[in-house]
Image (tube, grey):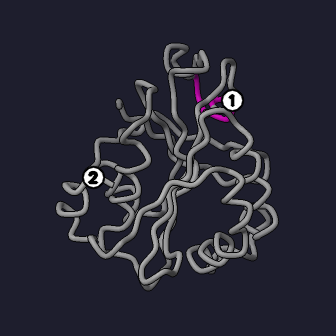
Amino acid sequence: MKPDVADRTRASELHVQFLDAQRMHELRDDFLDVYADAYAHRLDQPFSTIPRFWERLEMYASRAGFSVVTGRVHGELVAYASGYTLPAGSGWWRGLLGEPDPDLTEEDGARTFALTEMMVRQVCRRRGYARVLHDALLSDRHEPRATLLVRPDNNAARFAYRSWGWRKVGDLQPFDDAPVFEAMVREL
């Protein structure tokens, strides 16, 4: 982690570490504990169940360009962010509602990093941890842009993303059982 990132967010107590997919699998229970805490209010929804979440995370971890960054405080995993490089011909944009601009949706396997997960335990929110992980995850990416999906009712996250340089490009439903999200893009 770059010192200026920690200083800027005053979240210097957060120990940031990059992991590979194998290490993520080894820490499965820790990852799922953070998820269950962060999304406790949605675990009864089919798209948000713990098994369905882990299935998606494993799928993302199998993709080229996968990266996961964790945040620990006093040794406890309290937050993480992950993503991967969208492959050529990616289906990521398939659920975009309306008539999307082809320049937005064409993927060549090197153009876009998809930030797929970012979560912080409830008791650790509003400390700058999400920003530290966000910046760490995106700091060394080679893609010229990134994309993410955020729930329209998650006002805190939407506001944070906008303040970090993200812009909404449309609404997207990534899977049949998924809610509709706001799709955002940011130049890297």
92 left or right of 144?
right
Q: Return the residue at label 1.
A: 94
Residue at 79% over, 46% down: 176
Q: Return the residue at label 2.
A: 2
In this rendering, the answer to whether 43 lies above or below 17 is below
Q: Residues within 10 Å of mark 2 (few under 14, many from 20)?
A: few
Q: Are marks 2 and 1 in contact (CB under 8 Å)?
A: no
x and y, in percent, of residue 29 in the image: 72, 75
Q: Which residues are magenta?
A: 93-99
Q: Amino acid at mark 2?
A: Lys
36 left or right of 8?
right
161 left or right of 9?
right
Residue at 56% over, 45% down: 67
In this rendering, the answer to whether 16 lies above or below 115 is below
State how far apart marks 2 and 1 are (Cα): 36 Å
Please state, as top left, top right, bottom left or bottom right, where the C terminus lies in the image: top left
Please state, as top left, top right, bottom left or bottom right, where the N terminus lies in the image: bottom left
In this rendering, the answer to whether 41 lies above or below 2 is below
User: Magenta segment: does it hold 184?
Assistant: no
Q: Residues within 10 Å of mark 1 (few under 14, many from 20)?
A: few
